[in-house]
C-alpha cells in the first residue's frame, strides 16, 4: 500500500516500522531517510494529532500525551498492525524501540 501526503506516509515492503516525529514537526521530518527505509520495511510515518498537517484532536478530547497515544493506536489499527517497532526523530537525533502494544483486553 502506498499513501503519501496529508497527515501520513505509508509505503514499502517487509516488516512494519512506525516512525514518529518530534514536537513541532510532521512526518516529513523523515523524508530524507524514507527511500532507504522503505526498501526493507513497510513504513508508516504519521503526523501526530494537533501538529501542522495532522488531524485535529477529536471534539471534547483534552490535548496531551494520552490523546496522542490514542491517535497513534488508531493509526496502527487502520494499518492493520497489532505491533510495530518504533523509531523517533527528535531534532536531529534518532532513537529506536521494539515495544509492543498490550493486548486489547489489557488496555485501560
Image (tube, rainbow, N blue to C red):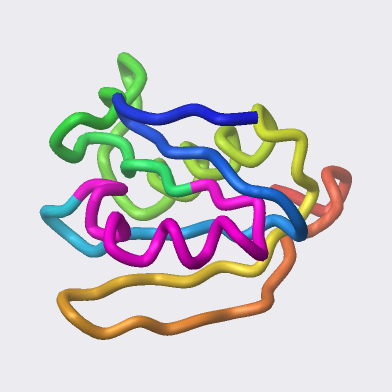
Count of labels in the image:
0
Question: Is 82 left or right of 84, judged from the image as shown?
Answer: right
Q: Residue at x 56, y 36 (%)?
A: 75
Q: Is residue 35 magenta?
A: yes
The percent coordinates of residue 14 (x first, y second) are: 76, 56
Residue furthest to the top: 59
Q: Which residues are magenta?
A: 26-44
Q: Residue at x 66, y 65 (%)?
A: 40
Relative to 101, residue 50 above or below? above
The percent coordinates of residue 26 (x first, y second) are: 23, 47
Q: Residue at x 35, y 19 (%)?
A: 58
> Residue 53 lies in what quarter of the image?
top left
* Near-viewer residue (48 or 9): 9
> Residue 63 lies in what quarter of the image?
top left
The percent coordinates of residue 17 (x first, y second) are: 61, 60
Question: Is 98 left or right of 49, judged from the image as shown?
Answer: right
> Residue 6 lies in what quarter of the image?
top left
The percent coordinates of residue 102 (x first, y second) are: 78, 59
The quadrant of the picture occupied by the N terminus is top right
Q: Is residue 15 magenta?
A: no
Relative to 12, residue 97 above or below? below
Question: Is 94 left or right of 97, judged from the image as shown?
Answer: left
* Near-viewer residue (22 or 94): 94
Q: Residue at x 32, y 42 (%)?
A: 47
Amino acid at each position: 500500500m502506498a499513501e503519501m501526503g496529508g497527515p501520513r506516509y505509508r509505503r514499502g515492503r517487509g516488516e512494519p516500522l512506525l516512525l514518529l516525529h518530534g514536537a513541532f514537526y510532521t512526518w516529513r521530518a523523515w523524508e530524507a531517510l524514507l527511500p532507504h527505509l522503505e526498501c526493507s520495511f513497510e513504513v508508516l510515518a504519521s503526523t501526530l494529532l494537533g501538529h501542522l498537517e495532522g488531524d485535529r484532536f477529536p471534539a471534547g478530547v483534552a490535548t496531551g500525551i494520552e490523546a496522542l497515544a490514542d491517535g497513534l493506536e488508531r493509526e496502527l489499527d487502520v494499518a492493520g498492525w497489532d505491533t510495530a517497532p518504533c523509531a523517533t526523530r527528535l531534532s536531529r537525533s534518532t532513537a529506536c524501540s521494539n515495544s509492543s502494544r498490550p493486548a486489547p483486553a489489557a488496555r485501560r
